[in-house]
């Protein structure tokens, strides 16, 4: 693999860390800025919404820019966003800083995938894209726990300084290693994206993605608080538990891809049933440290095991209902993942602020996943029928 690909992987690692590390720091941020947990949870929602709506719009607007200057500009924006977060004197300015970082996130993964594929021969393109996205997976396994540890030891601002430094390293690597003569694909127009959203079948899958992936974030957003205030773990233990959770996510992502290859709908049906059951179970096992840990490992496994199946399914369906816009349909599914994060974090905040309280977030998340299960069964039923949208005409 060319060295330029490792620069993209470092950038993906930094971006993945900044997206999820806030979960382990919510109690610390809330205490420092004198806000309650539901307000702190909006820091997660705002970032995810920035990716959801910023990515398709900015990708369309920057489609005619040269690839290398665009990537350098994105990493500069990422560094500025995280530096602003580290310096934010107030909650409101922290939200603005997170949105800046989110804009860089969405466009980077959209553009970075095509660049990674162009850096290698045709028969190694899939491996190159997987290498870049490995940075995101490794960030969940190592970057989030390390960032949480840094934040708990030196203050949450130190974590954002560290992530900004990673962004600088990625910027230098891209500037030094990425070729200047990268090919540029025809930009996806906003009208093409709107045309994809006009497909009822694809909207069902986007709903599956948002509810199935986002359901876990009702509880995961407030996981540090659950572990400290309900399970009884010390704050210093949270970073170690996040290592366990991240490792389970990595395994789930690999296994989920294998079981979804043959029949995505059948695999997703099974995974959503299991995910909803484990979330509901966590409402009870969270009371015991010995029961909470294996439940969290199972939840980490299931929360990302559905990702490959959802992505495979939307591509297969788009080939039938919107054959001229498969790439756009796939990109919008990435937006749906982030919309799910925003919805999950927002719903979790409502639950925490309600009489139900923090302990109810897992079973409320299970209800969202059950909604994804219902949509999956509905979509599978439509697949088995001959509908006008799927007919040869």
Image (cartoon, rainbow, N blue to C red):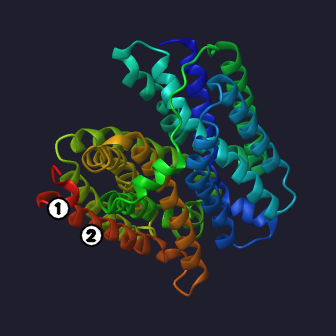
Whether residue 109 is visible to the viewer of this picture, yes or no, is yes
From the image, tell me which residue sits under label 2: 374
SS of the residue under disc 2: helix
- Find residue 269 and report its horizontal and vertical position in percent: 23, 59
Q: Is residue 122 above or below residue 321?
A: above
Residue at image position (55%, 48%) is: 56
Q: Is residue 47 left or right of residue 5?
A: right
From the image, tell me which residue sits under label 1: 387
Whether residue 148 is visible to the viewer of this picture, yes or no, is no
SS of the residue under disc 1: loop
Q: Report, in whole angstroms, how far the alpha carbon at label 2 lies from the one at label 1.
A: 19 Å
Give the mark nearest the N terminus, 2 or 1.
2
Which quadrant would residue 354 be assigned to in this image?
bottom right
Residue 295's disc number:
none
Residue at image position (34%, 44%) is: 308
Residue at image position (59%, 64%) is: 228
Please identify the residue farthest to the front as the structure is shown: 393
For the residue carrying disc 1, how many other residues have a C-alpha within 10 Å: few (<14), some (14-19), or many (20+)? Answer: few
Q: Is residue 381 above or below residue 127?
A: below
Q: Tell me if label 2 and label 1 are in contact, CB under 8 Å.
A: no
Q: Nearer the viewer, residue 99 or 155?
A: 99
Q: Nearer the viewer, residue 52 or 143?
A: 52
Count of numbered labels shown in the rendering: 2
Q: Is residue 269 left or right of residue 242?
A: left
- Find residue 291 and report its horizontal and vertical position in percent: 39, 62
**Nearest to viewer (mark 2 / mark 1):** 1
């Amino acid at each position: 693999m060319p060295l330029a690909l490792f620069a993209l992987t470092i950038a993906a690692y930094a971006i993945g860390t900044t997206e999820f590390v806030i979960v382990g720091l919510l109690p610390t941020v809330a205490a420092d800025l004198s806000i309650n947990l539901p307000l702190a949870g909006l820091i997660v929602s705002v970032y995810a919404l920035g990716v959801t709506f910023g990515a398709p719009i900015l990708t369309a607007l920057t489609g005619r820019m040269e690839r290398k200057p665009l990537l350098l500009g994105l990493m500069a924006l990422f560094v500025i966003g995280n530096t602003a977060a580290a310096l934010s004197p107030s909650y409101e300015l922290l939200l603005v800083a997170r949105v800046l970082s989110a804009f860089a996130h969405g466009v980077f993964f959209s553009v970075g995938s095509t660049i990674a594929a162009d850096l290698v021969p045709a028969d190694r393109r899939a491996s190159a894209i997987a290498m870049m996205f490995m940075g995101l997976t490794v960030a969940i396994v190592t970057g989030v726990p390390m960032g949480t540890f840094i934040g708990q030891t030196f203050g949450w601002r130190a974590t954002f300084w560290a992530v900004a430094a990673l962004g600088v390293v990625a910027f230098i690597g891209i500037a030094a290693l990425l070729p200047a003569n990268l090919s540029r694909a025809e930009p996806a127009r906003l009208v093409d994206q709107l045309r994809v959203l006009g497909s009822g079948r694809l909207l069902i899958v986007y709903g599956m993605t948002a509810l199935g992936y986002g359901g876990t974030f009702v509880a995961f957003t407030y996981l540090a608080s659950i572990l400290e205030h309900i399970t009884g773990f010390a704050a210093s233990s949270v970073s170690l538990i996040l290592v366990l959770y991240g490792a389970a996510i990595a395994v789930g992502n690999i296994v989920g891809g294998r079981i979804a290859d043959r029949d995505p709908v059948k695999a997703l049906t099974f995974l959503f049933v299991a995910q909803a059951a484990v979330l509901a179970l966590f409402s009870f096992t969270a009371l015991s440290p010995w029961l909470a840990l294996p439940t969290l490992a199972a939840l980490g496994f299931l929360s990302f095991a559905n990702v490959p199946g959802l992505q495979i399914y939307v591509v297969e369906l788009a080939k039938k209902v919107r054959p001229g816009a498969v790439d756009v349909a796939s990109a919008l599914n990435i937006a749906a993942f982030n919309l799910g994060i925003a919805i999950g974090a927002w719903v979790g905040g409502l639950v925490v602020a309600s009489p139900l309280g923090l302990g109810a977030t897992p079973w409320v998340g299970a209800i969202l996943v059950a909604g994804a299960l219902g949509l999956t069964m509905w979509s599978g039923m439509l697949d088995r029928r001959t509908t006008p949208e799927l007919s040869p005409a």
